[in-house]
Image (cartoon, helix red, strand yellow):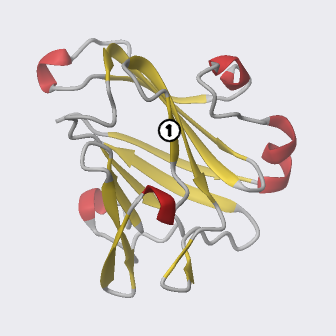
Amino acid sequence: MKIILALLFFSATAVAQLNQILIDENFEDWSAVQTYILDIEDNLSQGVDFKSLSITNDDNYLFIKIDFFDEIIIQEDTSIVLLINTDNDILTGLQDHNSGAEIKYNFGNHHGYFYHNNDSTEIFQNDIQLISAPTNSSSSYEISFALNSEINNTTVFSSNGHNSQKVLLS
């Protein structure tokens, strides 16, 4: 299993003005977004092979773009799991891969978990307003999460003046 990890700190105000992303299968709006992970090796023997990962946000959404070496259908028969540390504290949330993830989402199973105060709640796409495109096979996917999502009356993405997310993809 291959693991990709990116730790990001950025101002929501500055990024919001620069990176207007539409989840529309047109990836041109990602050209101004920095690629945080770039893997030039084809490691398909290790399962699904990630090529690159880009992350940005605006005032309302966290956006993630994932590129693969080969076409896949991310929503079907995959073991792709996305871990997101939404509060930038590795001591809270799930202690998987030292991530402190508050969100663990499995695309192939169409659900995940929200970890808060030593408790976990099963979540589905609509709970975190997760949108991904395309819905068919592709080597590139764009994904968004609503930054104002709440689970059990708890804000999922805490910002404290800036957005900080640690994203782990495996």
In the image, farthest residue toward the left: 45
Q: Which residue is mark 1?
A: 132
Say how many tags the image has: 1
Q: Position of residue 101 (x, y in %)?
A: 39, 64
Q: Quadrant of the N terminus?
A: top left
Quadrant location of residue 120?
Answer: bottom left
Residue 135 location, quadrant: top left
At a point 62% along the width and 72% down the height, the residue shown is 158
What type is the residue that disc 1 sits on? Ser
- Looking at the image, residue 126 sits to the left or right of residue 93; the answer is right
**Front residue of this view, candidates 146 and 82:** 146
Is disc 1 surrounded by few (<14), some (14 to 19) or many (20+) residues within 10 Å? many
Q: In the image, is residue 82 above or below residue 112?
A: above
Q: Residue at x 39, y 61 (%)?
A: 124
* Image vertical order of residue 18 relative to residue 16, above or below: above
Q: Is residue 156 above or below residue 31?
A: below
Q: Position of residue 55 (x, y in %)?
A: 58, 39
Residue 36 as seen in the image, left or right of residue 32: left
Is 144 placed left or right of 90 in the picture? right
Classify residue 26 as left or right of residue 13.
Answer: left
> SS at mark 1?
strand
Q: Position of residue 29 (x, y in %)?
A: 72, 24
87 or 116, nearer to the observer: 116
